[in-house]
Image (cartoon, helix red, strand yellow):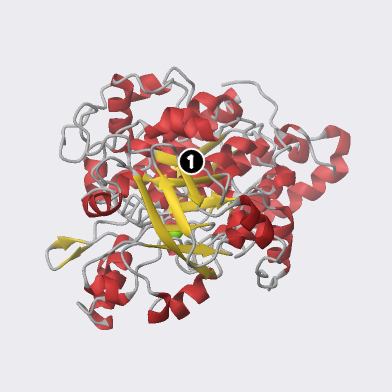
């Protein structure tokens, strides 16, 4: 072990400020730690605890933290557990997205202001992963991710039901009159049978897979279901490893490199990952000082085939993914195909390539060979046009039916034109979607605006708008949709989403009108409204729709500081702060 002097010793063992050291030491002793322990020169390891009663997806961490502590102790460290701001996806109104930057800010302040030398990031539910990795990048102290893991697979009537996916499907079935509310509730609860986060490849499983792909967790960490014994064992090993990392001074800046982020983009495509990965990867990269462009998404991500057969892009759920080998097995395929930059450092202390050795899957139904994928070109398609500068479309969830209806016109495959029906926010959508006077039919495009980071605020998961009940009853389960908000990672809607700039920031979506014809050309990566420039200029003389007033102080601060989804919806002033863990706070 090294003879490093840790930053915590500036609190606990500081001969120049013995007056302050006395103050710092005495209160930690009131729960039984001794001065000798705190002055022993051993690293103090923070455990960033994100589980609580109001974040059930991460609640398993209340248990796992005990195993992390044991690992830390056995390896010669001292654990200090503390809470991070909860970000519970399903329940937080107006959206958990508004809390990602708040959890980030809070964690930076804790890590900077307290005697912590290295940290275990306890991740799980959607935003809990990127927020903590963003903070780790800003701090640049040794950090390692411990995922909480997905729930067990859900079953209903002998069929797999995945969290989130069951909700979207159940809503459509209810609207089409196939099930009643009681049955819907039964299906929904069956999809969530145990502790853990979403068991689908929604945003939670995606972001934990990405943390692993970045090299920020131990190998095989992300896919272990929360209740499995391996989860506790992984917690113990993670605790042990972070102590060594503290001695090695192995920091996020050595791991979260451009190569790592490009590999994360590749992995996200191969697993059919959530569209929320786009803003979250951008945010983590920007806080790490890594530039990722829209062209990078196309160049490195788009052409990657779908290898993982997991809902919503495929059939199965998290337990089978873990048994099939999890993220390392998918990365092994990609590595064999030459799609990774795996000679890069990871928190294991070895290269990613070394981590992947011997990790081939034996379950070819779950993880397909690179040469026989579930779908070709499964990455996000980046679009631009006269309505926005940037938006994405998740091609891996385009159904055969949708493809046939919209993208298979002989002679102009991949191109379609639709009549826009425009909604100002989700309330407007819910109030009017079944209004016959809107004349929504199979050639309509549902458009939502006022749903971006400033407009909502936080950016809402609403772009996966379901068609009116009348169309659902005719068997039309999806219309083209477009919006400046996001959609759930568990959604199977082929939406054009994350459109930036949003209408509330002056984006052109603000002046789109119901009845306008929108032309989408997937081959050229374009989406345009077919009106003249003069007409556009004339419309822009009118004021855009007003965003609702902020209801809390944070909403106002968030809106004043946030950027657009294209660039990660970061707190813009924060991205220039990097490596602040090397800069000691005043006494
Ligand atoms: Fe928390 Fe899906 S709602 S992980
Ligand atoms: Mg969500």
What is the x, y in percent for residue 480? 37, 57
In depth, the one of 276 and 213 nearer the eye is 276
Residue at image coords 50%, 30%: 296
Q: Find residue 459 and report its image quarter.
A: bottom right
Residue at image coords 59%, 64%: 450
Q: Is residue 103 shown above or below 245?
A: below
Looking at the image, residue 190 sits to the left or right of residue 523; the answer is: left
Q: Is residue 456 visible?
A: yes
Q: Quadrant of the C terminus?
A: top right
Q: Which residue is mark 1?
A: 145
Looking at the image, residue 121 sits to the left or right of residue 360; the answer is: right
Q: Quadrant of the N terminus?
A: top right
What is the x, y in percent for residue 302? 39, 34
Q: Is residue 207 shown above or below 490?
A: above
In depth, the one of 371 and 514 nearer the eye is 514
What is the x, y in percent for residue 513? 54, 65
What is the x, y in percent for residue 178? 19, 77
Q: Which element type, helix, strand or loop, lies under badge 1?
A: strand
Mark 1 closeness class: few <14, some 14–19, many ≥20 residues within 10 Å: many
In depth, the one of 325 and 76 nearer the eye is 325
Residue at image coords 67%, 65%: 544
Q: Is residue 371 shown above or below 464?
A: above
Looking at the image, residue 39 sits to the left or right of residue 408; the answer is: right
Looking at the image, residue 16 sits to the left or right of residue 401; the answer is: right
- Marker count (numbered): 1
Residue at image coords 43%, 39%: 210
Q: Is residue 121 visible?
A: no
């Amino acid at each position: 072990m090294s003879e490093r002097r840790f930053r915590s010793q500036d609190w606990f063992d500081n001969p120049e400020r013995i007056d302050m050291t006395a103050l710092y030491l005495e209160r930690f002793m009131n729960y039984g730690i001794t001065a000798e322990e705190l002055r022993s020169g051993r690293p103090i390891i923070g455990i960033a605890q994100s589980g609580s009663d109001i974040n059930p997806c991460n609640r398993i961490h209340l248990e796992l933290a005990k195993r992390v502590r044991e690992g830390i102790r056995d390896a010669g460290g001292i654990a200090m557990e503390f809470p991070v701001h909860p970000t519970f996806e399903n329940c937080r109104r107006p959206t958990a997205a508004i809390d990602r930057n708040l959890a980030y800010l809070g964690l930076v302040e804790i890590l900077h202001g307290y005697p912590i030398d290295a940290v275990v990031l306890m991740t799980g539910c959607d935003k809990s992963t990127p927020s903590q990795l963003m903070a780790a990048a800003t701090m640049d102290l040794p950090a390692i991710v411990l995922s909480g893991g997905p729930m067990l697979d859900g079953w209903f009537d002998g069929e797999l039901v995945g969290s989130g996916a069951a909700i979207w499907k159940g809503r459509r079935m209810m609207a089409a009159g196939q099930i009643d509310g009681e049955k819907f509730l039964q299906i929904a609860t069956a999809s969530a049978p145990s502790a853990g986060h979403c068991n689908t490849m929604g945003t939670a499983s995606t972001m934990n897979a990405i943390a692993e792909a970045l090299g920020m967790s131990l190998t095989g960490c992300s896919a272990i279901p929360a209740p499995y014994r391996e989860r506790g064992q992984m917690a113990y090993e993670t605790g042990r490893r972070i102590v060594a990392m503290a001695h090695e001074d192995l920091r996020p800046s050595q791991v979260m490199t451009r190569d790592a982020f490009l590999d994360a983009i590749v992995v996200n495509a191969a697993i059919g990952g959530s569209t929320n990965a786009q803003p979250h990867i951008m945010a983590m990269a920007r806080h790490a000082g890594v530039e990722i462009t829209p062209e990078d998404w196309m160049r490195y991500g788009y052409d990657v085939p779908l290898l993982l057969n997991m809902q919503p892009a495929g059939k199965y759920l998290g337990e089978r993914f873990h048994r099939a080998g999890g993220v390392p097995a998918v990365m092994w395929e990609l590595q064999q195909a030459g799609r990774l930059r795996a000679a890069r450092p990871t928190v294991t202390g070895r290269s990613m390539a070394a981590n992947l050795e011997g990790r081939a899957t034996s379950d070819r139904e779950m993880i397909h060979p690179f040469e026989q994928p579930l779908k070709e070109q499964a990455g996000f398609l980046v679009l631009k046009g006269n309505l926005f500068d940037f938006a994405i479309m998740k091609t891996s969830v385009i159904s055969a039916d949708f493809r046939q209806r919209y993208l298979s016109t002989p002679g102009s495959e991949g191109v379609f034109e639709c009549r826009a029906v425009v909604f100002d926010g989700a309330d407007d959508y819910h109030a009017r979607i079944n209004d016959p006077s809107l004349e929504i039919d199979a050639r309509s495009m549902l458009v939502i605006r006022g749903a971006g980071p400033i407009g909502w605020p936080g950016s809402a998961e609403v772009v996966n708008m379901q068609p009116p009940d009348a169309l659902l009853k005719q068997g039309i389960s999806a219309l083209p949709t477009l919006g400046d908000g996001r959609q759930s990672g568990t959604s199977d809607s082929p939406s054009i989403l994350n459109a930036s700039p949003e209408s509330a920031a002056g984006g052109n979506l603000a002046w789109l009108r119901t009845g306008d014809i929108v032309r989408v050309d997937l081959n050229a990566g374009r989406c345009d409204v077919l009106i003249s420039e003069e007409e556009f200029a004339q419309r822009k003389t009118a004021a855009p729709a007003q965003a609702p007033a902020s209801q809390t102080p944070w909403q106002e601060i968030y809106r004043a500081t946030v950027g657009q989804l294209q660039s990660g919806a970061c707190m813009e002033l924060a991205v220039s702060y990097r490596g602040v863990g090397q800069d000691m706070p005043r006494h």
